[in-house]
Amino acid sequence: MLITGANRGLGLDFVRRLAPEGWHIHACYRNPAKATDLQALADRHDVTLHALDVADFAQIDALKKTLGNEPIDVLFNNAGIMETIQRTLSLDHTNQMFDTLDEDEWMAVMRVNIMAPMRLCEVFVDNVAASARKQMLMMSSIVGSIGSNQTGRWYHYATSKTALNMVMRSLAADLKDRGITVMSLHPGWTQTDMGGPSAALTIDESVGGMVAVIKNLTPADSGRFIAWKGEDVPW
Ligand SMILES: NC(=O)c1ccc[n+]([C@@H]2O[C@H](COP(=O)([O-])OP(=O)(O)OC[C@H]3O[C@@H](n4cnc5c(N)ncnc54)[C@H](OP(=O)(O)O)[C@@H]3O)[C@@H](O)[C@H]2O)c1
């Protein structure tokens, strides 16, 4: 597996669960000072660490050079941001409201949440196609669901996740002939730095559910948008 944003939150918990099961994991982080928990896992398991800011496409190309043609069973685009300044989500979140939007900020969110996952899928497609599982996963959000949107706001983040789901559907169609399964996950509102302490789910509940979903994926699931418990999320 290659997973982005693996140093904290949901990404770290995937590594914490799968590494002891014997998975070989390429775990990406940005800042070594914020990757001490990940380093501790790498010290004990088959986890290789890579510095990767997904917004810097030259770093993605450099990682491809490092990994060469190594098969990658699961390419997991987990890294994501709500905004460039780290803040926790709350239901009374006042940012990204109508009439307060910042286009440069919006572009920065789009680059991390959509363009970078697309770039990673393009750069590593041969590695995934050469693997046994052949899976590309996108960490999306129900906030990107058009059908579920009754609250408005969160324009930057919500539109990025909606677009990520469309990227996922196009990849599922384009890569079907190569046997690659592509899908989006909604982790639930979870108690990470992004989700905040009031969130509904613990990291354990969210990632535990998603791991079960991922382990049971088949090619017939390609193109689906699935929540942490396995049910489809409305588009
Ligand atoms: N928590 C929720 O309730 C929730 C709900 C729906 C969807 N999600 C999605 O789940 C994913 C993980 O979220 P989380 O809750 O675990 O958030 P988090 O605790 O804020 O962690 C975000 C992770 O993404 C990394 N990241 C951010 N920008 C990056 C960049 N440019 N390059 C590389 N890595 C970058 C962060 O690295 P640094 O430590 O270097 O910043 C961190 O590892 C995101 O895609 C998020 O949108 C979360």
Image (cartoon, helix red, strand yellow):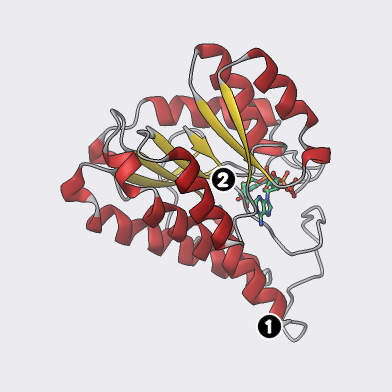
Residue 78's tag is: 2
Label 2's element?
A: loop
Q: Amino acid at mark 2?
A: Asn
Residue receiving disc 1 = 103
* Residue 39 coordinates in the image, percent (x, y): 73, 26
Q: Looking at the image, which residue is at 63% across and 48% down?
A: 52
Residue 150 in view in this figure: no
The mark nearer the N terminus, 2 or 1, is: 2
Please state which amino acid type lies under the numbered disc 1: Glu
- Given residues 229 and 158, the one toward you in this image is 158
* Label 2 within 8 A of ligand 1 by Cβ: yes
- Pick the residue in front: 33 or 68: 68
Element type where label 1 sits in the image: helix
Does residue 1 sit above or below 81 in this rendering? Answer: above
- Looking at the picture, how far across and down is residue 139, in whole percent? 53, 47
Tell me if residue 177 comes above or below residue 103 in the rendering. above
- The structure residue drawn at horizontal position 66% and vertical position 13%, both measured from the top left corner, is 44
What residue do we see at 66% from left, 75% from top? 106
